[in-house]
């Protein structure tokens, strides 16, 4: 699992560098840097707005007596989305802007909750033992 994550990060970094070089060769270095900075600023503002909106949804559900589990997970996902948007690069910006969309976050939050709330198959490890009593 860790190896897959490492390979993904290295591949994403390599792809981001290639894309930035390609964009810089077509638009120029200044416009490329400005584009990366602008997407970071816009993304930060969107994440902040969605964070406030998520907090309001959590409070609303809690006041009505419901457990806001999906909203909590979706709000926590905003940290990852914010990190993607602040990371320089266009691929991470696209992924981050997709993650800002509330319906997308809710979809993935429900999937995460469903995945981790399933009962385990097999019931765990069985350890067989024997016990003796000493008669005096």
Image: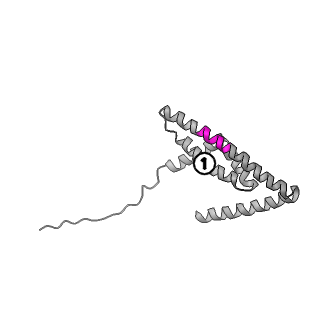
In the orientation shown, which residue stands out farthest toward the top? 64
In depth, the one of 14 and 134 nearer the eye is 14
Counting labels gives: 1
Residue drawn at x 62%, y 62% is 5
Residue 134 falls in image quadrant? bottom left
In depth, the one of 41 and 82 nearer the eye is 41
Task: Tell whether 110 sits left or right of 96.
Answer: left
Element type at mark 1:
helix
Judge whether residue 39 is colored magenta: no
Q: Position of residue 52 (x, y in %)?
A: 61, 39
Most frequent secondary structure within the magenta stretch: helix
Q: Which residue is mark 1?
A: 77
Which quadrant is home to the C terminus? Answer: bottom left
Task: Tell whether 20 sits left or right of 76.
Answer: right
Task: Tell whether 113 sits left or right of 81.
Answer: left
Please tell me whether residue 101 is drawn above or below residue 120 in the rendered image: above
Q: How is the image coloured?
A: one colour
Residue drawn at x 56%, y 41% is 71
In the orientation shown, which residue stands out farthest toward the left? 136
Q: Position of residue 121 (x, y in %)?
A: 47, 54
Q: Residues within 10 Å of mark 1 (few under 14, many from 20)?
A: some
Q: Position of residue 122 (x, y in %)?
A: 44, 56
Q: Position of residue 22 (x, y in %)?
A: 83, 59
Please tell me whether residue 133 is drawn above or below residue 36 in the rendered image: below
Residue drawn at x 27%, y 65% is 130
Please tell me whether residue 114 is drawn above or below residue 63 in the rendered image: below
In depth, the one of 93 and 43 nearer the eye is 43
Which quadrant is home to the N terminus? Answer: bottom right
Residue drawn at x 25%, y 65% is 131
- The span picked out in magenta is 46-54
């Amino acid at each position: 699992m860790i190896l897959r994550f490492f390979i993904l990060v290295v591949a994403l970094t390599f792809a981001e560098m290639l894309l930035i070089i390609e964009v810089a060769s077509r638009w120029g270095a200044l416009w490329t840097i400005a584009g990366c900075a602008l997407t970071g600023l816009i993304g930060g503002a969107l994440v902040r707005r969605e964070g406030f909106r998520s907090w309001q949804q959590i409070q609303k559900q809690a006041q009505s007596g419901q457990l806001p589990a999906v909203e909590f997970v979706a709000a926590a996902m905003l940290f990852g989305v914010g990190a993607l948007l602040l990371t320089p690069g266009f691929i991470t910006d696209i992924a981050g802007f997709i993650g800002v969309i509330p319906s997308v976050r809710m979809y993935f939050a429900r999937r995460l909750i469903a995945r981790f709330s399933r009962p385990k198959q097999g019931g765990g490890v069985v350890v067989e033992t024997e016990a003796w009593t000493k008669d005096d």
